[in-house]
Image: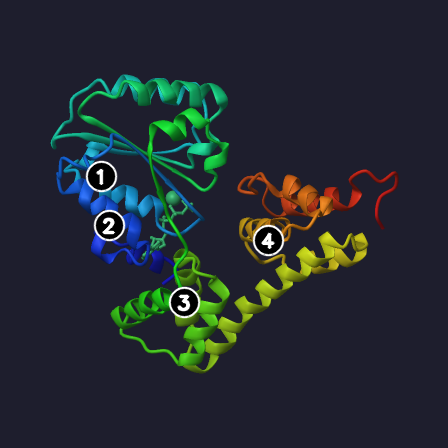
């Protein structure tokens, strides 16, 4: 049940929810219309869990690449220049089965500077049987020259209406049914992020009917505790208070909390407020907690409060 989001990963452009402009452009480019030819380097960017990797895989398939000719590399794990050298070397080989070979490079902003420079060279002289598909949540961390070399496609969160259609589709396929209230709770909590929504849905469906609303609400509670954490950090509350809130979030996913904190602070800054604390929090939260996990989150919060002070903020 917990892998609902993998089970229902769209396998064609027609089953991708929302993102109509991006889907439409890709359809035209894939149709072979010479006015809008298919680019050799594509960059999908946008928030986590909204369809970048999914679209990359669909495009690879639509291009006719098969089996081992589609290669996925997670740049978070292989960040160095050797990875890119290896990709370039392998790209000189002809495809094994289909007409082309496709590299899907996930989390591409994680590449080191040297690796990005090597990547730039790869993008500059791409063999005619090769396509590069780059995916990232942080396009601003890429060399501008890399961005400039790629056709860029923005991937957006879903509207509430689109999210409802997606959830209903999955619930129906699972031969289940849910109350309107539960749908609304999930939609409200997941703010347009399909992976997130399907994870919550899996939790909801894993319990008996009478407990489902409570499970959906628990996620809402996490969300509100996260907002409490954001408020406490921005107002520089004492460590005692912040640590209390953190304890309440211990069973939650630190990465999700990190992104929520970034979103909260970004909203403050984009509203035009001159808020150095929000900016400082963003700096402390900018690197993922994939490896550091909950300790990483804890120390980031501590650093925000302690920053610039002579004494620890107890
Ligand atoms: N637009 C969408 N329509 C339908 N389902 C979607 C869509 N976007 C994401 N999903 C669901 O969410 C899951 C995760 O999507 P995907 O892996 O493409 O996200 P991503 O943007 O690559 O995220 P990340 O930045 O974390 O790598 C998919 O398996 C699918 O079930
Ligand atoms: Mg991805």
Q: Circle 3 is placed at which residue position?
A: 160
Of the image marks 4 and 2, the number of the one nearer the N terminus: 2
Q: Residue at x 29, y 54 (%)?
A: 20
Element type where label 3 sits in the image = helix
Establish if 151 lies above or below 118: below
93 lies left or right of 169:
left
Element type where label 2 sits in the image = helix
Q: Circle 1 is placed at which residue position?
A: 60
Disc 4 to disc 2, C-alpha distance: 30 Å
User: Is ligand 1 less than 8 Å from the beta carbon at label 2?
Assistant: no
Disc 2 to disc 1, C-alpha distance: 16 Å
Circle count: 4
Q: Residue at x 43, y 71 (%)?
A: 204
Disc 3 to disc 2, C-alpha distance: 21 Å
Of the image marks 2 and 1, the number of the one nearer the N terminus: 2
Q: Circle 2 is placed at which residue position?
A: 24
Of the image marks 3 and 4, the number of the one nearer the N terminus: 3
User: Is ligand 1 less than 8 Å from the beta carbon at label 1?
Assistant: no
């Amino acid at each position: 049940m917990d892998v609902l989001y993998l089970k229902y990963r769209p396998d064609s452009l027609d089953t991708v929810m929302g993102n109509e402009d991006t889907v439409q452009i890709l359809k035209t480019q894939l149709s072979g219309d010479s006015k809008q030819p298919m680019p050799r380097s594509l960059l999908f960017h946008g928030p986590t869990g909204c369809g970048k990797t999914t679209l990359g895989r669909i495009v690879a398939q639509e291009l006719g690449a098969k089996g081992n000719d589609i290669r996925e590399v997670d740049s978070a794990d292989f960040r160095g220049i050797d990875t890119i050298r290896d990709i370039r070397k392998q790209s000189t080989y002809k495809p094994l089965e289909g007409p082309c070979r496709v590299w899907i490079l996930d989390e591409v902003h994680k590449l080191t500077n040297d690796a990005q420079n090597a990547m730039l060279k790869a993008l500059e002289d791409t063999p005619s049987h090769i396509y590069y598909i780059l995916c990232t949540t942080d396009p601003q961390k890429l060399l501008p020259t890399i961005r400039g070399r790629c056709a860029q496609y923005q991937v957006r969160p879903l509207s509430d209406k689109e999210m409802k259609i997606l959830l209903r589709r999955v619930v129906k396929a699972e031969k289940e049914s849910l109350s309107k209230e539960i749908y609304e709770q999930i939609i409200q909590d997941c703010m347009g992020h399909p992976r997130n929504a399907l994870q919550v849905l899996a939790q909801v469906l894993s319990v008996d009917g009478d407990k489902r609303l409570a499970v959906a609400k628990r996620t809402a509670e996490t969300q509100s505790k996260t907002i409490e954490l954001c408020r406490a950090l921005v107002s520089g509350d004492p460590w005692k208070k912040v640590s209390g809130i953190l304890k309440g979030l211990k069973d939650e996913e630190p990465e999700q909390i990190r992104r929520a904190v970034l979103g909260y602070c970004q909203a403050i800054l984009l509203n035009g407020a001159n808020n150095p604390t929000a900016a400082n929090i963003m700096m402390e939260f900018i690197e993922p907690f994939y490896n550091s996990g909950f300790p990483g989150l804890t120390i980031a919060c501590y650093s925000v409060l302690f920053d610039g002070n002579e004494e620890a903020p107890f």
